[in-house]
Every structure is written in structure tokens, then in C-alpha cells.
Amino acid sequence: MSESMSDLFNETSGLGIADRFRGFLPVVIDVETGGFDAKTNALLEIAALPILMDDEQNLYPENCYSVNVEPFEGAVVEDSALQFTGIDLDDPERNPLSEKEALTTVFKPIRQLMRDHDCKRAIVVAHNAHFDLGFINAACDRAGVKRNPFHPFSCFDTATLAGLAYGQTVLARACSEAHIGFDNSEAHSATYDATKTAELFCKIVNTWSSQIGWKP
């Protein structure tokens, strides 16, 4: 290895996810809800999937953390939303947590990863991201959660990124264009959608980095 190549290797080999995204830890979030209004409709499921970076500076999904959520008192749950998601609120195996318990459960591993990777804050990655971020922020406000790890308004939206990269904004179609398997019968569960969104985000960023070249 030449001196110049060795120097380049030494300069880049220690880079981590905090270097890639300006101190942010990207975390894919998917929520399933009882409607479209974050203030009045229930939050029913949360899935969170942190994104990390390997020694070759390629992004990859970490473990997925997911919980079912008990509708807050007075929450509106529209029948059309339940039909769309397939959620059965009376399912005895659902074992939902209160909003505060659910958020605490999901935020704990995110905060640990932030510490482990020297990230100052987490940032939401989602498909139509402001929808998911709005429900997380509203639930934090209702539950009195003071240490929300996520930036309050900045996010990475894979609908926008996929529109740029593949000319598709629907998650299933974007995955198809990216050659990522997608099972429509599994869609609209928070865990499945978060997993596919994570794969899509990593594919877009890794492809961009390899073709254009990313430098810190």
C-alpha cells in the first residue's frame, strides 16, 4: 500500500455514523394509528429501527424495536384505519403499553446507541416522515416525556428520496424499483414497514455514496 493510500485508509477507517450525518443517529420509525390527526387519533403501534455504518462506510439496519400502544383516553380510532392496518384492538395477545411506557421502551435502546456512537441526537427516517414524527411528538407531549431523543422537526423522508432515486413515492413501488422484496400481505404493520423503509433508505444512501463518493 502506498503512503498516500495508507494515509487515506487511516483517515477514513475510524469513521462512524455520527460522522456521516452531522452527529445524528438515523432511526427508521413507522407508526400505525387510528387516523391521520396526531392530536386526536390514537397511536396504536410504534416500530423503531436504528441505522448504523460498517467499516466500509455502508449503512445497515440494526435491530428493530416495536411495541403495541393502548389508545390514550378520549382517542379517536376510525374503523377505516383498523381495516387498513388489520389491527384488532381486542386481540388478547396484543398486550399494549400506555403511550408513556411505549415511548420509554422504544427510546431506551436509541439513547444507548446514541451514547455508543457519539451521536448528539437521533433523527427520524420514515416514509412520509412528518406523519410519523408528528405522532411521536404528539404522544410525547401527552405523556409528558421530556427527553425525546429525536430532532423536533428535521427528518429524512424516504418518499422524497425514492422519488428522486427511482421515480416512485409509494413504498411498495419504490422497493420494487430498488429490487427489494416487498410482500403486500405483510404491509401496514409497523415492524414490516419500518424494515422495508430501512432497507430502502440504506440502498439509496449506499448507492449514492458509491457512485458520487462521500467524504466527511
Image (tube, rainbow, N blue to C red):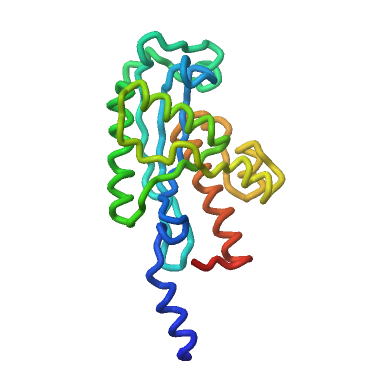
x, y percent for residue 211: 63, 66
Tell whether 170 sits left or right of 114.
Answer: right
Q: Is residue 95 visible?
A: no
Q: Residue at x 47, y 64 (%)?
A: 57
Residue found farthest to the right: 167
User: Total marks drawn?
Assistant: 0
- Tell me residue 193's x, y (percent): 50, 36
Residue drawn where x is 53% and y is 33% of the image: 130
Q: Residue at x 37, y 34 (%)?
A: 66
* Residue found at the very far bottom of the displayed protein: 2
187, above or below 96, in the image: below
Residue positioned 42% across, 76% down in the render: 11
Give the vertical position of 109 relative to 89 (above or below).
below
Q: Position of residue 207 (x, y in %)?
A: 59, 60
Q: Residue 126 in the image: state x and y as whole percent.
A: 52, 39
Q: Of 179 and 39, which appears nearest the observer?
A: 39
Q: Is residue 201 visible?
A: yes
